[in-house]
Amino acid sequence: MDSVTQTAQPDLQVTLAGVRMKNPVMTASGTFGYAREYARLVDLNRLGGIIVKGLSLEPSRGNPPPRIVETPCGMLNAIGLENVGVERFINEKWPFLKNLATPVWVNIYGKVSEEYARVAERLNALPGLAGVEVNISCPNVKQGGVAFGADPAAAAGVVRAVKSSTDLPVMVKLSPNVSDIVEIALAVEAAGADALSLINTITGMAIDIESRRPKLANITGGLSGPAIGPVALRMVWQVARQVQVPVVGIGGIASAKDALAFLIAGATAIQVGTANFVNPRVTMEIVAGIAAYLKTHAMAGMDELVGSLRGD
């Protein structure tokens, strides 16, 4: 591709599982609500993609408080996937979302494969929905609470169940709490995943030393924020080298520099999560920062940037 001139604007468009996006900046599930909450702060139509809060078959109240704890360079959360359920989402949230010019993905989860499939089937009827993101970090009640994402066969089983229930693109969100994330990535790719997003939160905990009690009612929670950035970047690089489907990078992205590192490592797009709580306009800053970088480095489009790591 020809290099851009000093006055030309670089093309930030990317394609993710057949979905064309105006730029590679997406919002991460659980950190952006159902998007309307941010409408007065962010131009939602300038985002590359929106992923709404995880949905289950039935509404869920989540875990009891306290559910969030600040930690050095990040936060722990044990929200417990509180959500309105798929039917209320369709009736109450989708009417706003469907009018956006930005592709909307719905994150889904379940306690058994059949629940994932039923949620995906219900969402399949929504005209204009871009796709589903499958959260496989959830406990499989049929396997004693072991997370689907910790076992290649279980993870693949969920993906096959979802793929059989929807015509939508299926992106699978991988857990970092495994011994070999590449093994899980290859298993879900073979099962039909159209894209992969990684990473979900890293399990951690915090203790109040004065009371000698856990700071979270759930005792453990998911660590997110800048603290997990280097781990997420390493895992994205590892997976992107081994799979053929597009990879979306998540974890500790709080600036354009962070996002650019994930893109250079091989991510087709990125998701911004915890940083939305600190700076609600961070996604807009990242879009502008990526465009400035491409222009400074005389790159015409994203294909010159994605996977351009040298020396690996």
Image: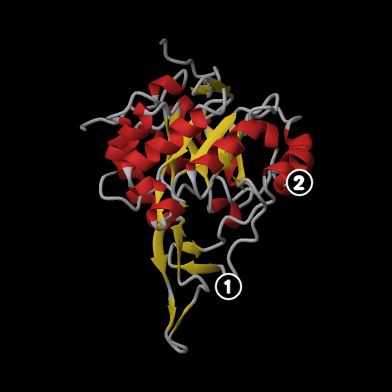
Q: Is residue 71 visible?
A: yes
Q: Is residue 140 visible?
A: no
Q: Is residue 148 left or right of residue 15?
A: left
Query: How many marks can you see?
Result: 2
Q: Amino acid at mark 1?
A: Pro
State the separation of the CA atoms marked 2 and 1. 28 Å
Q: Name the residue beneath numbered marker 2.
A: 40
Dot 1 lies on which element?
Answer: loop
Q: Earlier in the sequence, mark 2 or mark 1?
A: 2
Q: Which residue corresponds to the image point at 45% horizontal and 54% vertical from the top-left?
A: 141
Q: Nearer the viewer, mark 2 or mark 1?
A: 1
Dot 2 lies on which element?
Answer: loop
Q: Name the residue beneath numbered marker 1.
A: 66
Q: Which residue corresponds to the image point at 51% horizontal and 73% vertical from the top-left?
A: 216
Residue 37 in the image, given as x and y percentages of width and height = 72, 49
Residue situated in front as seen by the camera: 3 or 198: 198
Residue 20 in the image, given as x and y percentages of width and height = 56, 21
